[in-house]
Amino acid sequence: MKFIATTLTLAAAALFAGCASGPTITPQLQQARADVTTAQADPAVLKYAALDLQKATDSLRRANELSAKRESLADIDSAAYVASTQARTALTIAKAQTDEDAIKPPKPTASAPVPTPTANAPAAPSPVQPTPRPTPMPPARRPPSPRAMPPKRRHRLPPCRRS
């Protein structure tokens, strides 16, 4: 009898331990967490792709909730994949924008004023000359319709004489 009581106690302890275990963590969820953390640490993402970063954070929160509820691995991986993709998109947008800013010419600052023409100074000739307009072509002539043409007149030759 003591053996059965001990077995039941161990079985109940194992059952409660299984219910009290932590959330299900998949490799895809770990990758999503790393991607979102990387995006959050990038100041360019915060400047140029804040909305995409917010979407990634929301998707990661959903994946974490599914993991905490011990939902199916496919659901957890799906939400984690979406979060990871959105975080990488935010990083790509931020990188593209910073690259675009790097190739733009610098804007003039207040310390270096841009020279403006004055009323006394002669106007500089324009470096761009206007291109002359081509002469218009005459309208295309269409052949007259068959109804508008007079019937063809056939000239008859005199019959050939046989000798």
Image (cartoon, helix red, strand yellow):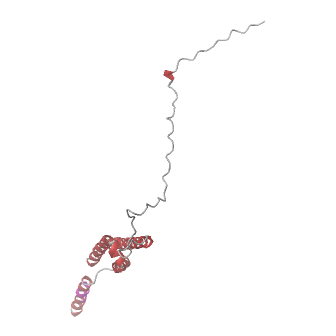
141 relative position to 123: left or right: right
In x, y percent, where is residue 71? 28, 74
Give the residue furthest to the front. Answer: 120
Residue 32 shows up from this direction = no
Would you say the magenta stretch is mainly helix, strand or loop? Answer: helix
125 relative position to 42: left or right: right
Report the magenta residues as a range. Answer: 10-15
15 relative position to 131: left or right: left
The answer to which image quadrant residue 17 occupies is bottom left
9 relative position to 151: left or right: left
In x, y percent, where is residue 56? 32, 73
Q: Magenta segment: does it hold 12?
A: yes
Of residues 5 and 113, which is closer to you in this image?
113
The answer to which image quadrant residue 40 occupies is bottom left
The answer to which image quadrant residue 100 occupies is bottom left
In x, y percent, where is residue 33? 34, 79
Q: Quadrant of the N terminus?
A: bottom left
